[in-house]
Image: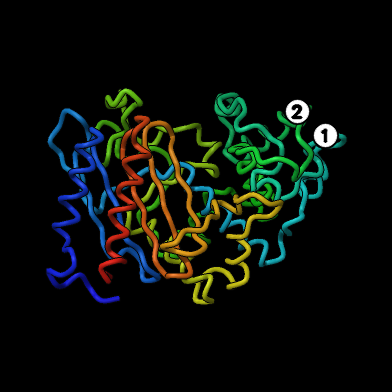
């Protein structure tokens, strides 16, 4: 698509002005958004301040916490091992961990990779994550502790029977990946996902250097800044596969662009049919592998996800059939943040309507 080069279509300043209007309307510290094609971010806009009470402005190159938008990345990473034959969609926990005696007779034994990645495992949303953190063990071992600690869960829905959103399910799926590769999830993410896609500024945990207002600072549901910032200002690291990636918009857009290109056989990581599988919801319903699948007049069969660690919010919408996507972020945990992000997505859709990039 051509650039926004004429006054018949909006220019960067127009989007910037409208973005600031949305920010002020919802009283957020900062907002950012990007319009994405198969070539990555084609328009990036950001407005507001990194931290309330300062005048340090955010930039289009700042790093944002993506929360549960991490799930699509984890599912994509795991799929690389599925294509390599190290895992199958029907691989079960008991099959991958045959020596874990606590799994014998446990309701978790027959949970498959598909159950875990599509929230059809019957597992609860979370568990006592902090217990593993207190152990001080490496993260892969902590995830093993989590698996063993939940083998005694009872009164779970039958596998596949019920949709129950579960961070725990994604952590256990990631631990299956760790087991078959004999490597920690974080290292696999860097080597098999971030590096091939050129996501050089992407990492894990809270944003910024501790005490430095060098990145968007997280804000509580009250709208006030958190007492501190930095990598530890996030959920426990053991949970990372379910929601701890942070990235600048350009890097996140590279991942989004891979999914846009992938369904047309032009992806770098997976086959076209595999990308189609990732956006197909099994068991009925509309949740696939890290994506909610919907139909919209503007995009046909679209996929979306949102994310929050209660101190930041993010959302993305992809229209693979049309070859474009939008993403939006804020460094705030207030309840009205999702509404503001939806308005940013609506604003960014104008790029497509105006024949933008």
Residue 272 x/y as whole percent = 58, 73
**Colouring method of the image:** rainbow
Please state which of residues 283 and 327 is positioned toward the viewer in this rendering.
283
> In this rendering, would 147 be left or right of 46?
right
**What is the secondary structure assignment of the residue under circle 1?**
loop
Q: CA distance from mark 2 to mark 1?
A: 8 Å
Residue 201, how many percent across, how many down? 35, 54
Please state the horizontal and vertical placement of residue 179, each as a whole percent of the image.
Answer: 69, 49
Between disc 2 and disc 1, whose residue precedes?
A: 1
The secondary structure type at the circle numbered 2 is: loop
Taking the spot 31% from the left edge, 41% from the top edge, the residue there is: 340
> What quarter of the picture does the C terminus occupy?
bottom left
Number of marks in picture: 2
Residue contact between numbered discs 2 and 1, judged by CB atoms under 8 Å: yes
> Residue under circle 1?
106
Quadrant in which the N terminus appears:
bottom left
Whether residue 143 sits left or right of residue 50 in the image: it is right
Location of mark 2 (residue): 153
Q: Is residue 38 above or below residue 79?
A: below
For residue 334, above or below residue 341: above
Q: Return the x and y of residue 200 as percentages of the image width and height.
A: 37, 58
Q: Residue at x 58, y 60 (%)?
A: 279
Determine the residue positioned at 47% across, 32% down. 235
For the residue carrying disc 2, how many other residues have a C-alpha within 10 Å: few (<14), some (14-19), or many (20+)? Answer: few
């Amino acid at each position: 698509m051509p650039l926004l080069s004429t006054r018949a279509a909006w220019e960067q300043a127009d989007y910037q002005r409208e973005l600031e209007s949305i920010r002020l309307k919802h009283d957020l510290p900062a907002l950012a958004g990007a319009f994405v094609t198969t070539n990555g971010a084609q328009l990036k806009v950001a407005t507001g301040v990194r931290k309330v009470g300062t005048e340090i402005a955010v930039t289009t190159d700042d790093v944002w916490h993506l929360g549960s938008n991490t799930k699509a990345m984890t599912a994509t990473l795991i799929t690389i091992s599925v294509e390599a034959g190290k895992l199958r969609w029907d691989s079960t926990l008991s099959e991958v961990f045959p020596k874990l005696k606590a799994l014998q007779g446990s309701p978790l034994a027959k949970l498959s990779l598909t159950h875990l990645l599509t929230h059809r495992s019957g597992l609860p949303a979370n568990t006592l994550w902090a217990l593993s953190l207190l152990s001080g063990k490496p993260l892969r071992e902590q995830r093993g502790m989590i698996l063993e600690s939940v083998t005694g869960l009872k009164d779970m829905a039958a596998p596949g029977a019920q949709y129950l959103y579960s961070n725990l399910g994604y952590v256990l799926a990631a631990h299956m990946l760790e087991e078959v590769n004999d490597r920690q999830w974080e290292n696999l993410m860097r080597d098999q996902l971030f590096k091939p896609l050129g996501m050089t500024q992407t990492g894990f945990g809270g944003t910024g250097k501790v005490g430095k207002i060098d990145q968007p600072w997280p804000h509580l549901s009250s709208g006030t800044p958190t007492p501190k910032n930095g990598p530890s200002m996030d959920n426990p690291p053991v949970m990372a596969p379910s929601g701890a990636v942070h990235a600048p918009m350009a890097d996140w857009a590279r991942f989004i662009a891979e999914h846009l290109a992938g369904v047309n056989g032009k992806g770098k990581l997976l086959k076209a049919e595999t990308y189609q599988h990732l956006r197909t919801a099994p068991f009925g319903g509309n949740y696939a592998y890290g994506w909610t699948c919907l139909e919209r007049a503007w995009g046909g069969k679209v996929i979306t996800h949102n994310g929050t660690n209660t101190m930041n919010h993010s959302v993305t919408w992809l229209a693979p059939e049309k070859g474009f996507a939008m993403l939006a972020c804020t460094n705030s945990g207030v309840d009205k943040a999702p509404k503001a992000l939806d308005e940013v997505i609506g604003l960014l859709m104008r790029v497509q309507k105006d024949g933008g990039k």
